[in-house]
């Protein structure tokens, strides 16, 4: 998952360039920013694709270089997907671009917006970077998730952030056995279990008390939620490990599987959930090479007052004693 990847350029014969635009249409601010992006891209001859069910909210002139598309083929042939909103909107974009591998560029209008690369106040610079193709794309590890009932595969899906097995009813505890690489590890009475990627380490995993993992680290995470057990610690395992959560057949409460907080699967007693490294990564656009440490500080507004840093850095700041 190195960021040292070539600049994303369209081939000379691919013109006109096409970009998919997705927005949180329930927010007026997002609609206003989306219209600005469309207008700026059209000035430079870029064809803008918009989901047909979002077109009415955006009130765009579809006769002037704006294409209406269905979700299933939205990202096909697009150079990138520009997403205006918060992490939820970006996760939706990840779903639409997963098969095509189209890079996703998030412009944050949410709260933390950890998946977003740009902020709305930097809109002009962001548009300029798109027009001039001054961006890179990095692959983010995903997870593939399979749900079994006995030997029958009930459903299969995937996630960018996490797959969480949770109790379906507040008053019922979930009884599970967890497994790593085909070997049982522990039995927990708990509210749930989170299986996350490094990208998802700052999402639900973070709230559940799991570790923050740098995106360049290839690993899978398993974190129990409010487990009543002596051994119930967050775990970081190899990226090729297979994680499994079995809902005990005699448990009184049913469970539910959430993937990225967007897709759900009901889990009856006896269900088995297997999580492994995804076959397809999600590509996130980067406009600059800011270290992940700086992103943590900015997104969480972490206190760093008093840091003096290296002597070289101090020499570059006039007025600071070395």
Image: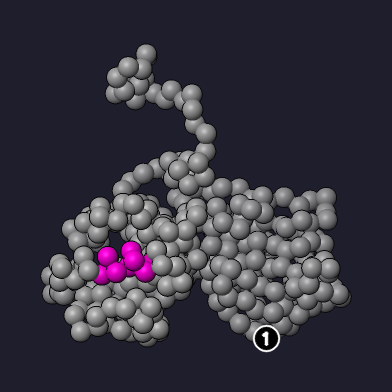
Residue situated furthest top in the rendering: 321
Magenta stretch secondary structure, dominant: helix
| Residue 64 within the magenta-colored segment of the rendering | no
Residue 120: image location, x then y, percent: 36, 55
Would you place residue 146 above or below residue 139 in this image?
below
Q: How is the image coloured?
A: one colour
Residue situated furthest front in the rendering: 28
| Residue 33 within the magenta-colored segment of the rendering | yes
Residue 70: image location, x then y, percent: 37, 85
Give residue 316's quadrant in the image: top left
Residue 199: image location, x then y, percent: 50, 56
Using a 10 Å C-alpha cutoff, classify the residue at mark 1 as few (fewer than 14 neighbours), some (14 to 19) or many (20 or more).
few
Q: Quadrant of the N terminus?
A: bottom left
The residue shown at (76%, 52%) is 232
Residue 240 at least partly seen: no
Q: Nearer the viewer, residue 61 or 89?
A: 61
Q: Nearer the viewer, residue 176 or 182?
A: 176
The residue shown at (50%, 41%) is 301
Would you place residue 43 above or below residue 221 in this image?
below
> Which region is colored magenta?
30-38
Residue 142: image location, x then y, percent: 50, 65
Residue 64 at least partly seen: yes
Total label count?
1
Give residue 240's quadrant in the image: bottom right
The residue shown at (84%, 68%) is 171
Would you place residue 109 above or below residue 316 in this image?
below
Disc 1: which residue: 152
Give the side of residue 220 with respect to residue 40, left or right: right
Give the side of residue 152 with respect to residue 104, left or right: right
Give the side of residue 1 with respect to residue 155, left or right: left
At mark 1, the secondary structure is strand
């Amino acid at each position: 998952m190195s960021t040292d990847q070539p600049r994303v350029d369209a081939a000379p014969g691919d013109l006109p360039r096409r970009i998919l635009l997705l927005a949180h249409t329930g927010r007026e601010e997002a609609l206003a920013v989306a219209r600005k992006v469309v207008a700026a891209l059209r000035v430079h001859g870029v064809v803008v694709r918009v989901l047909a069910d979002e077109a009415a909210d955006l009130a765009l002139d579809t006769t002037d270089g704006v294409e209406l598309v269905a979700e299933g083929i939205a990202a096909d042939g697009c150079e990138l997907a520009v997403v205006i909103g918060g992490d939820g909107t970006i996760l939706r974009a990840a779903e639409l671009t997963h098969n095509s591998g189209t890079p996703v560029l998030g412009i944050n209008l949410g709260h933390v917006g950890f998946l977003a690369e740009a902020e709305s106040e930097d809109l002009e610079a962001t548009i300029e970077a798109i027009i001039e193709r001054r961006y890179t794309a990095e692959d983010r590890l995903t997870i593939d998730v399979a749900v079994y009932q006995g030997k029958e595969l009930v459903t299969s899906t995937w996630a960018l952030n996490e797959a969480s097995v949770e109790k379906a009813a507040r008053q019922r505890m979930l009884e599970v056995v967890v497994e790593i690489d085909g070997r049982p590890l522990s039995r927990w009475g708990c509210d749930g279990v989170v299986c996350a990627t490094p990208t998802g380490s700052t999402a639900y995993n973070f709230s559940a008390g799991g570790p923050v993992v740098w995106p360049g680290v290839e690993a899978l995470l398993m974190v129990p939620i409010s487990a009543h057990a002596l051994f119930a610690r967050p775990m970081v395992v190899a990226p090729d490990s297979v994680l499994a959560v079995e809902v005990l057949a005699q448990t009184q409460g049913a469970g539910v599987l959430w993937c990225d907080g967007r897709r759900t699967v009901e889990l009856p007693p006896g269900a088995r959930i297997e999580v492994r490294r995804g076959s397809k990564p999600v590509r996130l656009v980067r406009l600059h090479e800011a270290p992940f440490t700086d992103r943590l500080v900015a997104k969480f507004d972490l206190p760093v007052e008093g840091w003096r840093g290296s002597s070289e850095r101090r020499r570059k700041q006039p007025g600071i004693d070395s």
